Image (tube, grey):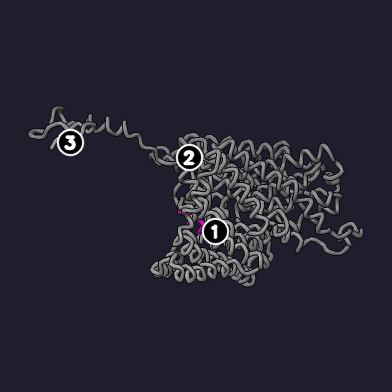
């Protein structure tokens, strides 16, 4: 009955019934049919309330509303708009610069929001009109915005990774750490594609004219090289501090080293803006105080605090040097572009450290990290409102709309999960999991044949189902088969996550395409800057623009399969026990002064006990 049951589920979904109710109804109907035919034991249904309450008591799923709320607050507070404006100004004159900015901001928003809809809609509203204004090809512009928004699915704190870890029975923290590098590599592949387009079809991705670039110095210079000096200095400090703590080169090392460098650059910008050349004496006093604090902490053995104080002192010293140069020679080592980029980028990057950093180093669980992220988003929005004086960045309406959207999405996910529980109870009761396991493990080619078939299956199902539905329906069926074949489930989950990302990008149910279509101009409109009439963006242009990025996502799946160490590095942060070393240490145990304890024979743990 298992194949018939699975086929009936596909039929219900194709007929357009809501996924949660189709799953639950399918499970209950076939439970009754199975009881009547003697293929299903009615005692199984007694476990249904326990399975439902077990889902409601799952603390890991609490991370979903936390991360959703965090992303929605940041999106509604204008952070995405500030990022796109500043990074667009930074990369603008470069051929394809706006596309690079969209990819960079998409990755940054993915690491702070984890919500695809928020990223795609924000970038579509802000970047698409600018790209159209300056002559970008409509297919390239649409494709890069939709694809960059889907990075929120694979770059932590992704919602689908939480569900994937829960369905596979693995740690969310390990899943996050394993997906970190593949997510960055995928963003890099997007940038490589834009670079190839800029070489092959330069008219598709023109650079911005100089008159459209702001944040200039008094002499008209852009001051980009000063930003490069600041980034280089901050990176050196961050690397030094993390190297001194003995961290190994892994995802947690990268995140923490970057975070410390970000803190240093922010301190440099703060000291320079409010002190610096305006008050060199005060800056020197602050630097001296931080150096004294660092020396005190080092002398008292507070190593980690001492390293943090070193980073603070480095920021103050840099600002002191900048201030002295400007006061004595008039030379600015901290340009307006460097200051603006730092002040815009540091808040989301600080939130990334607050969430991902604490999860990677084991200080917080994903649920606790999500709670800190939600509170941090409110604090950042409040700071933005205070510094800009714009009340729309954080008010009751912003919090209410974010809360309502969070409740809707969380209820959507939970109802699908409850329906999947009902379906899986009946499916397991008729030995459906055994049927699927035998079907997949008996494929020719062993692990390679299994991976090829599973990836093709997920890619095809992604045409009709979104990533939540795939995670709740397909993953519980194929996960046990992967485990039986000896496949690491964290690596397997990340590979499936990259594959499921295509569900946002290809028709007929590519939700990223729907999100972009909802904000792209459907009718000709008058550009508010140039005053020219701009033609509407066709749906076919959005679809064709997504095709190259779907191909890139498929290439990324192949790279994860060919280079598993992109994911498997997560094991380096786990504690590894050497049993031989433990046995040797136990054999070498002896009482003080040498010799055996009186009346107690020496025990050889390598030999079986004599009774």
How far across and down, in percent of the image, does residue 199 sit? 82, 37
Residue with the most extreme left position: 599
Q: Give the structural element (helix, strand or loop) at label 3.
A: loop
376, 492: nearer the viewer = 492
Distance of label 1 from label 2 (alpha carbons): 60 Å
Tag 1 or tag 3, which sits nearer the N-term? 1
Q: Is residue 370 magenta?
A: yes
Q: Is residue 553 magenta?
A: no
Is the stretch drawn in magenta largely helix, strand or loop? helix
Residue lying at 47% horizontally and 50% vertically, measured from the top left: 480
How far across and down, in percent of the image, does residue 179 sit? 56, 46
Tag 2 or tag 1, which sits nearer the N-term? 1
Q: Are marks 1 and 2 in contact (CB under 8 Å)?
A: no
Tally the marks: 3
The residue labelled by disc 1 is 3
Crowd around label 3: few <14 · some 14–19 · many ≥20 (10 Å): few
Q: Quadrant of residue 531?
A: bottom right
307, 117: nearer the viewer = 117
Q: What is the magenta range?
A: 365-372
Distance of label 3 from label 1 (alpha carbons): 53 Å
Tag 2 or tag 3, which sits nearer the N-term? 2
For residue 282, say whether it is visible: no
The residue labelled by disc 3 is 609
The residue labelled by disc 2 is 307
């Amino acid at each position: 009955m298992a194949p018939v049951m699975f086929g009936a589920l596909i039929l219900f979904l194709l007929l357009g019934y809501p996924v949660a109710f189709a799953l639950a109804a399918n499970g209950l109907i076939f439970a009754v049919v199975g009881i009547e035919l003697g293929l299903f034991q009615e005692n199984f249904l007694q476990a249904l309330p326990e399975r439902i309450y077990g889902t409601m008591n799952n603390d890991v799923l609490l991370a979903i509303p936390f991360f959703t709320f965090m992303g929605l607050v940041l999106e509604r507070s204008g952070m995405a708009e500030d990022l796109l404006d500043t990074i667009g100004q930074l990369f603008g004159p470069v051929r394809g610069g706006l596309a690079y900015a969209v990819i960079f901001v998409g990755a940054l928003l993915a690491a702070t929001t984890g919500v695809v809809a928020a990223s795609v809609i924000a970038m579509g509203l802000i970047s698409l009109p600018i790209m159209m204004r300056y002559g970008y090809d409509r297919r390239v512009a649409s494709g890069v915005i939709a694809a960059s928004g889907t990075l929120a699915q694979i770059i932590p704190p992704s919602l689908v990774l939480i569900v994937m870890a829960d369905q596979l029975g693995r740690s969310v923290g390990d899943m996050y750490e394993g997906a970190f590098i593949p997510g960055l590599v995928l963003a890099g592949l997007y940038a490589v594609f834009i670079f190839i387009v800029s070489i092959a079809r330069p008219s598709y991705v023109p650079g911005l004219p100089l008159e459209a670039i702001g944040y200039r110095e008094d002499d008209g210079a852009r001051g980009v090289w000063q930003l490069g000096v600041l980034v280089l200095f901050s990176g050196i400090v961050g690397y030094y501090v993390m190297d001194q703590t003995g961290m190994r080169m892994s995802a947690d090392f990268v995140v923490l080293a970057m975070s410390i460098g970000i803190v240093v650059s922010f301190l440099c910008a703060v000291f320079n803006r409010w002190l610096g050349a305006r008050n060199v004496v005060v800056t020197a006093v602050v630097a001296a105080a931080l150096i004294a604090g660092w020396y005190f902490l080092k002398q008292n053995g507070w190593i980690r605090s001492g390293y943090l104080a070193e980073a603070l002192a480095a920021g103050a010293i840099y600002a002191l040097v900048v201030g002295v140069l400007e006061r004595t020679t008039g030379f600015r080592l901290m340009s307006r572009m460097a200051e603006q980029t730092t002040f815009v980028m540091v808040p989301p990057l600080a939130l990334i450290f607050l969430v991902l950093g604490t999860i990677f180093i084991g200080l917080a669980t994903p649920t606790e990290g999500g709670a800190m992220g939600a509170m941090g988003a409110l604090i950042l929005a409040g700071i933005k409102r205070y510094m800009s004086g714009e009340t729309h960045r954080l008010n009751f309406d912003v919090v209410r709309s974010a809360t309502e959207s969070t409740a809707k999405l969380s209820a959507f996910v939970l109802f699908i999960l409850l329906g999947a529980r009902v379906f899986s109870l009946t499916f397991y009761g008729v030995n459906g999991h055994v049927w699927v396991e035998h079907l997949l493990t008996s494929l020719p080619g062993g692990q390679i044949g299994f991976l090829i078939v599973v990836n093709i299956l997920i890619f095809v199902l992604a045409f009709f189902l979104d990533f939540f539905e795939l995670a709740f329906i397909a993953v519980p069926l194929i996960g046990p088969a992967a485990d039986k074949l000896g496949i690491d489930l964290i690596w397997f989950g990340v590979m499936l996550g990259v594959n499921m990302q295509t569900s946002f990008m290809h028709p007929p149910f590519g939700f990223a395409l729907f999100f972009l279509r909802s904000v792209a101009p459907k009718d000709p409109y008058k550009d508010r800057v140039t005053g020219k009439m701009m033609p509407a963006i066709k749906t076919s242009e959005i679809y064709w623009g997504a095709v190259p990025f779907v191909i890139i996502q498929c290439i990324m799946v192949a790279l994860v399969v060919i280079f598993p160490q992109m994911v498997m590095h997560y094991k380096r942060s786990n504690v590894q026990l050497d049993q031989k070393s433990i046995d040797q240490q136990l054999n070498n145990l002896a009482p003080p002064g040498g010799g055996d304890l009186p009346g107690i024979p020496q025990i050889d743990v390598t030999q079986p006990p004599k009774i």
